[in-house]
């Protein structure tokens, strides 16, 4: 286990954070950051596609005030983890199940550091897809909170067959390391203005995300590869067919969501006996980065769930 950089000034997280390089079972180097606190347990933060540890520094601060440590990860192919294509801005993965190798390394680290228990999961977007699979495989957490989980890809009904066919054919033709059409090598927060963005209604938080990627260019990531798209379509279809885990859960979904598919979230939560779906007016994709009143309501509900008071949300 080797120390890795943690840009806490950019993260605006609690003091005393650390980060490490981890090598997964298939030899990929990922980065894990930890902000300690912990008398109430440890939150495993599973970020979304394009994201990185420092983006959740403020979330770690909120959790620290309520007695939780937070462990976050740079998934393979993003953040400061190993990039998996010649073009470092391409969001690529070989198999979606490979993310579970990253999860295994995170859990091994949490165990070796003897991080305070109980452990909980907080998973956003693609992290929600990875997290649901990990739960199905026995992830040792007591409760889970999802923010706009990617249990389906946000494409129109008319374009869905096209997404399946184009992504599948790209593998046969050797073009699977090409960008998904309409995407490219630029980071979303640097190539789009705040007005009309799909992530947050808070201009200050949008600037916070821009500042991080401007300062550390290696945080930047562009669009996904056709291989990533095909793998994501396969994985989300499999997950929707599985029974819901027997674990307390709360899922937040924004009324203005434009990035993930809405129907699968309703379908999964409808069969989650110990789960609750909360749809929030005027919210966009990123609840931990939303307007202050939305962000606070989300994080308060997460705390209520973890503390065993989910009925108060």
Image (cartoon, helix red, strand yellow):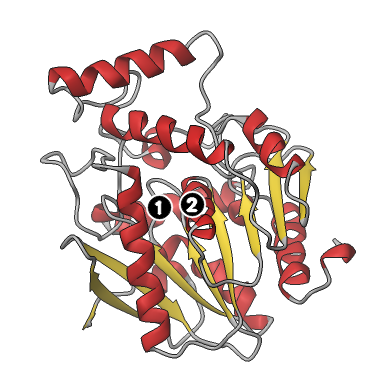
x%, y% of residue 135?
54, 59
Against 285, residue 27 (above or below) is below
x%, y% of residue 297?
77, 59
Disc 1 from disc 2: Cα separation: 19 Å
Q: Which residue is mark 2?
A: 133
The quadrant the N terminus occupies is: bottom left
**Residue 302: which quarter of the image?**
bottom right
x%, y% of residue 218?
24, 54
**Which residue appears farthest toward the right when viewing the image?**
312
In depth, the one of 86 and 116 nearer the eye is 116
> In the drawing, does residue 90 fall left or right of residue 208?
left
**Residue 85: which quarter of the image?**
top left
Against 104, residue 203 (above or below) is above
Q: Residue at x 30, y 37 (%)?
A: 222
> In the drawing, does residue 68 fall left or right of residue 305?
left
Look at the numbered disc 2 and give the secondary structure of its residue: helix
Q: Residue at x 36, y 30 (%)?
A: 229
Q: Residue at x 57, y 36 (%)?
A: 241
Q: Which residue is mark 1?
A: 51
Q: Residue at x 33, y 74 (%)?
A: 6
N-terminal label among 1 and 2: 1
> In the drawing, does residue 180 fall left or right of residue 251?
left
Against 165, residue 98 (above or below) is below
**Neighbour tally class for label 2: few under 14, some 14-19, many 20 plus, Cα within 10 Å:** many
Which circle, 1 or 2, is nearer the viewer? 2
In depth, the one of 307 and 171 nearer the eye is 171
The quadrant the C terminus occupies is: bottom right
**Neighbour tally class for label 1: few under 14, some 14-19, many 20 plus, Cα within 10 Å:** many
**Which residue appears farthest toward the top when viewing the image?**
158
Q: Is residue 290 visible?
A: yes
Look at the numbered disc 1 and give the secondary structure of its residue: loop
Q: Is residue 7 visible?
A: no
């Amino acid at each position: 286990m080797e120390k890795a950089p943690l840009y806490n000034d950019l993260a605006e997280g609690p003091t005393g954070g650390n980060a490490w390089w981890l090598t997964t079972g298939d030899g990929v180097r990922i980065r894990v950051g930890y902000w300690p606190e912990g008398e109430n347990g440890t939150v495993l933060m599973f970020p979304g596609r394009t994201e990185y540890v420092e983006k959740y520094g403020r979330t770690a601060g909120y959790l620290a005030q309520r007695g939780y440590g937070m462990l976050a990860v740079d998934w393979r192919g993003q953040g400061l983890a190993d990039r998996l294509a010649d073009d470092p801005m391409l969001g690529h993965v070989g198999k979606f199940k490979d993310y579970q190798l990253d999860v295994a390394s995170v859990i091994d680290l949490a165990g070796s550091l003897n991080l305070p228990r109980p452990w909980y999961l907080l998973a956003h977007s693609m992290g929600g897809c990875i997290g649901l699979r990990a739960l199905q495989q026995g992830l040792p957490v007591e409760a889970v909170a999802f923010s706009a989980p990617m249990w389906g890809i946000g494409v129109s009904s008319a374009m869905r067959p096209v997404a399946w066919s184009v992504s599948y054919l790209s593998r046969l033709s050797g073009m699977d390391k090409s960008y998904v059409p309409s995407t490219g090598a630029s980071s979303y927060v640097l190539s789009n203005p705040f007005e009309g963005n799909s992530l947050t209604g808070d201009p200050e938080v949008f600037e916070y995300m821009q500042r991080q990627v401007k300062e550390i260019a290696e945080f930047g990531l562009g669009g996904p590869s056709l291989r990533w798209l095909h793998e994501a379509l396969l994985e989300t279809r499999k997950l929707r067919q599985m029974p819901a885990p027997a674990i307390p859960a709360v899922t937040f979904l924004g009324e203005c969501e434009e990035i993930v598919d809405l129907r699968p979230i309703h379908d999964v939560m409808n069969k989650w006996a110990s789960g609750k779906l909360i749809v929030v007016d005027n919210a966009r994709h990123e609840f931990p980065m939303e307007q202050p009143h939305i962000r606070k309501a989300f994080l308060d509900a997460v705390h209520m769930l973890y503390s065993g008071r989910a009925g108060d949300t």
